[in-house]
Amino acid sequence: MEISDYRRKKISSILMIVVGIILLLCPGFFLAVGFVLGAIVLILAAILLIFGISQCLVSPITGVISIIVAILGFIFGWALFFSPVLVVTIFSILVYLIGIIFILVGIANMFTSAFFAPFSLLGIVGILFGIAFIIAGIFIGNPYVIAAIIGIWLIISGVLSLQSDRNETYIDVNAYGQK
């Protein structure tokens, strides 16, 4: 049984709202991401190490590079798993980049709104939250501020995505330029 695009979009919208509410009600959940992310990186590093060792006979360069990346993955995963504060440090370094990405996605959504009307509002929300992320860089020492901003953004994006399902006004882009 295949899930339709409509159901897939509805499920992802509801998940965005649920995760947003969880981040607002329990911002400590944000720090738990460090443990989970650390475990995932450790597992991926182990798989990459096995792949690298097996590749050494076939392609020594690929094998060695895979082993080096696996070792770096073990170091990074170990640090994330046993020091979730590292997650806060990573976010403090990347918060401005995240803000810029939100702004760029917002601008892209504004351009996309020429073909799908609800994206204009998503574009404005993306730009505003990008600016909020850049401003929040001042308060980045407190991960709860970032958890709240992400939570609010997820809730608004999820609600807007659900709203767009009611009034889908797609424009056939391929129709233009064809004779």
Image (cartoon, grey):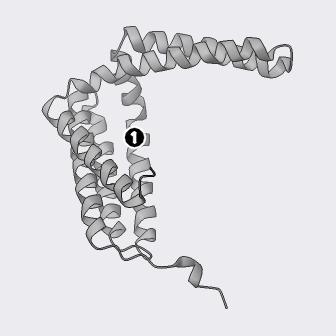
148 relative position to 89: left or right:
left
Q: Is residue 34 above or below residue 13?
A: above
93 relative position to 28: left or right:
right
Q: Quadrant of residue 82?
A: top left
Residue closer to the observer: 13 or 5 = 5
Question: Can residue 155 be seen by looking at this rendering?
Answer: yes
- Which residue is depicted at the point 46% across and 62% down? 108
Q: Which residue is mark 1?
A: 96
Q: Is residue 107 above or below residue 72?
A: below
Q: Looking at the picture, which amino acid does disc 1 mark?
A: Tyr
Residue 119, percent across and down? 36, 67
Question: Can residue 72 be seen by looking at this rendering?
Answer: no
Residue closer to the observer: 95 or 70 = 70
- Which residue is depicted at the point 47% across and 20% down? 40
Residue 109, percent across and down? 41, 64
Residue 122, percent across and down? 32, 62
Return the residue found at the far front.
Answer: 1
Return the residue found at the far left.
Answer: 25
